[in-house]
Image: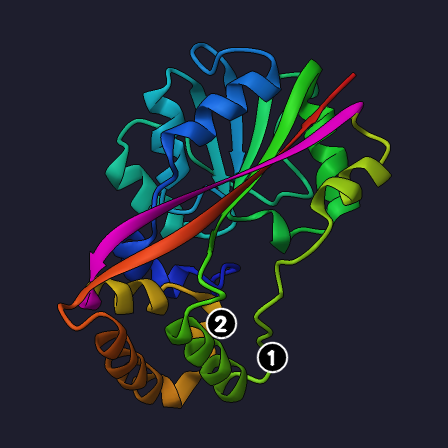
Amino acid sequence: MGSRSLFDPLVDAYDAARPTYPEALFDDLARLAGRPLAGADVVEVGAGTGIATRCLLGRGARVVPLDIGAAMLARLRERTPGIPAVLADAEALPLRAGVADLVCYAQAWHWVRVPAAAAEAARVLRPGGALAVWWNDVDAEDEQWWGRQQDRLEVMNPAYQRGYRARPYADELRWTGQFADVVTLAGRWARRIDVDTYLTWLRSKSYVAEIGDRLADFLDAERRSMLRAFPDGIIEEPFRTVLVVARRP
């Protein structure tokens, strides 16, 4: 049986090059959730290799990470031994009702059917608990290298559109009727990485992998493009991190 996750075949690239999250995001998360992360019971859905898991653990949360990808969870367990990671679907969480202070989705909410996943999150939350979803989005729309990359992606993978994550996430959560308050915050940050790590980061993306037989051509073109923009081979990659927190009554 094949993997249920598009990301299982990409686990090495994902683990090696995906960005982490800024500390300010977790400060905002605690504030909007109305409680400290230290001591909180957190269910993290779509945990992947555990990038956000380790951030939450570092803040003192008790975390149960879930994912549909067996290889992703195996890497998470390697990186974070002893954690109770569980193979599970967002729309059928294997948890009793009212067991969590916080349900989190880091870089994963856009994959779910919102009404079903929101209902499951609301079910496992305690009264007053919160659902939190967040993303790192590359914030380079004004950069020529970014425009060239997006043009190339849309030609080489016709199923890809650069605005695929531009959705009214807060409104979608309000419309479910499951939550009393929904708040969105955004912040900007940047990281510096070498060009080889940058290309590994690109390979960790499902829509890049779907280029298929022309993937090598895409990566060669990206190397040339990025070295034209960053001749020293060190890429300054800007991000906009978006956090949406929905509180249960």
In the rendered structure, the answer to whether residue 19 lies left or right of residue 103 reads left
Query: Would you say the residues marked 1 and 2 are in contact, meaning their CB atoms lie under 8 Å apart?
Result: yes
Query: Would you say residue 209 is visible in this rendering?
Result: no
Q: Nearer the viewer, residue 137 or 45?
A: 137
Q: Position of residue 109 (x, y in %)?
A: 61, 47
> Residue 105, located in which quarter of the rendered image?
top right
Query: Would you say residue 205 is visible in this rendering?
Result: yes
User: 10 Å neighbourhood of mark 1: few (<14), some, or many (≥20)?
Assistant: few
Q: Nearer the viewer, residue 46 or 93?
A: 46
The correct choice, above or below, for 147 with respect to 105 in the image is below
Q: Which residues are magenta?
A: 180-196
In the rendered structure, the answer to whether residue 161 lies left or right of residue 38 reads right
The correct choice, above or below, for 219 with respect to 33 in the image is below
Label 1 sits on what residue type? Answer: Ala
The residue at which mark 2 appears reads as 207
Q: Nearer the viewer, residue 241 or 215?
A: 241
Q: Nearer the viewer, residue 124 or 181?
A: 181
The residue at which mark 1 appears reads as 159
Secondary element at image label 1:
loop
Secondary element at image label 2:
helix
The mark found on residue 6 in the picture is none
Name the residue: 38% across, 89% down.
Answer: 213
Q: Is residue 63 magenta?
A: no
Q: Position of residue 244 (x, y in %)?
A: 63, 36
